[in-house]
Image: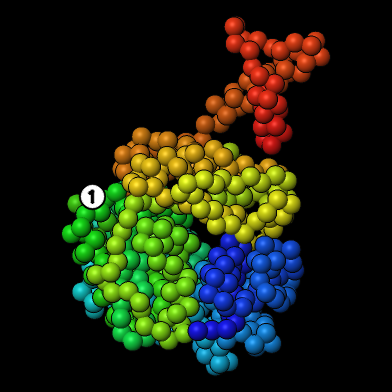
Amino acid sequence: MFKKILIANRGEIAVRVIRAAKEMGIATVAVYSECDRAALHVRLADEAHLLGPSPSAESYLNIDRVIEAALSSRAEAIHPGYGFLSENPEFARRCAKAGVAFIGPAAAAMEQVGGKIVARETALEANVPVVPGTRDGVRNVSEALKAAGEVGFPVLIKAAAGGGGKGMRLVERPEQLASALRDAQSEAAASFGDSAVYLEKFIIHPRHIEFQILADRHGNVIHLGERECSIQRRHQKVIEECPSPLMTAELREAMGAAAVSIARACQYENAGTVEFLVDAQRNFYFLEMNTRLQVEHPITEWVTGVDLVKEQFRIAAGEKLGLRQQDVAWRGAALECRIYAEDPGNNFFPSPGQITLLRTPSGPGVRDDTGIYEGWTVPVFYDPLLSKLVTFGRDRSEAISRMQRALEEYQVAGIKTNLSFFRSILSHERFLAGELSTDFIQRYYAPAATTTQSAMLRDVALVAAALHASREGKAPSRGKHVESAWKQAGRVESLRQS
């Protein structure tokens, strides 16, 4: 096993990796940009190295500086986390060239499933169904029109080199195709440095279900079951759960076997995720493979009892998997909400700034993976993810109840967060019934601006009454009911945080 590793990331995932390493007796090296000098991952690591200025291109994305930090600290391996350099095959090659183990798959495996077009080919060769579409990229309108005519409208134009909704356009009618193609190519070039796009059939109200893979260098490949990731905003996952409410034993076996087949086809090693779309008839189609640890990995850990980060360390160190497929068991249910510094009342606009108050939830079945603390200033340079709030229960109903309770306990002041957004989604009757789809938020969520404003006006009136009553030496009343002093104080504090 490694004696020292470097974590080439920041925020909650860097903290998560550091904690797993410490539990295994592995020394940790953090890297940081100028605005992250006081970050939690820097404080928790055994040592830390400055990479450079705050922009990620000059710090966390700078391969030379990351490798230099690993060599100067004598780290034996690098864990890339997710995002930044985690799916960069050139980074994996540079690590190998420098004699530093990369805690992830080989560069060749990344390339075989990293680009979406080549990944579709890999899936087809492994006899795994894919969403109907083009096998090659589309370069112009005539090619796109021909392909769309073959698969039928509506269609999606998608960037070949990236994800997160960048370079993606929905086309419902032929006359929309030319402008959508131009916009998708332009955005793909700007986001990923590659304007290549392809076209696939748009599945109506699909579910997004992914399978967690573990594979070692000795040819052992297993899956740890599925995660339902259908609750998405702008093609970004925001709520995940395990197991999926849709899943049956037969469907899990079929999808799990397909995921393992794809991993074997590219001689995959380490942790990875194979993603699928599932239609209303429970037909599933390969979507893509993420060659890294996923943001939502904690829910799989809780339901299976497998620490995925520790497994990553063991696999990268050359050890065999300690699990066989028949050893994997699923117990209970888990949910994850991604807590962001953003304002739901202002189209989810990012909300950087200083955290003046932070009270995180706890209690039975609650886990909060975070990289922040009270007094920390959320920078403007990176993704505004604050934490991943995870709950576990004996079944889905208990996991949801615990999440609802945890969301009520969570308090953050000084910045805006999306906590109210999650409270709304988790109380929706269709979510509670497990009736999910990737367009759930567009169909069922509408920010209640008027209701929020009315509630604020009501609270202002109550606080004014409380202040007036305190000056008069008596408590305000509403009919026969008299509010306690602590409740009045709580309302004042609530308004102050708003």
Q: Residue furthest right?
A: 471
User: Which residue: 31% across, 77% down?
Assistant: 221
Q: Is residue 198 visible in this depiction of the protein?
A: no
Is residue 29 toward the left or the right of residue 264 in the image? Answer: right
Of the pair 88 and 139, the residue shown nearer to us: 88
SS at circle 1:
loop
Residue at figure coordinates x 52%, y 86% from the top left: 101
Percent across and percent down for residue 192 are: 52, 71
Residue located beneath label 1 in the image: 280
Q: Is residue 332 left or right of 189 when viewed as pictured?
A: left
Q: Find residue 72 and report its image quarter.
A: bottom right
In the image, what residue occupies the spot 47% across and 85% down? 317
Is residue 164 shown to the viewer in this render? yes
- Location of the C terminus by quadrant is top right
Query: Percent x, y for residue 445?
Result: 44, 38
Amino acid, disc 1: Ala
* Residue at left offset 26%, top offset 67%: 256
Q: Quadrant of residue 156?
A: bottom left
Label 1 neighbourhood size at 10 Å, few (<14), some (14-19), many (20+)? few
51, above or below 211, in the image:
below
Residue 495: where, in percent of width, then height?
A: 69, 31
**Position above or below: 250 against 192:** above
| Front-most of residues 275 and 211 | 211
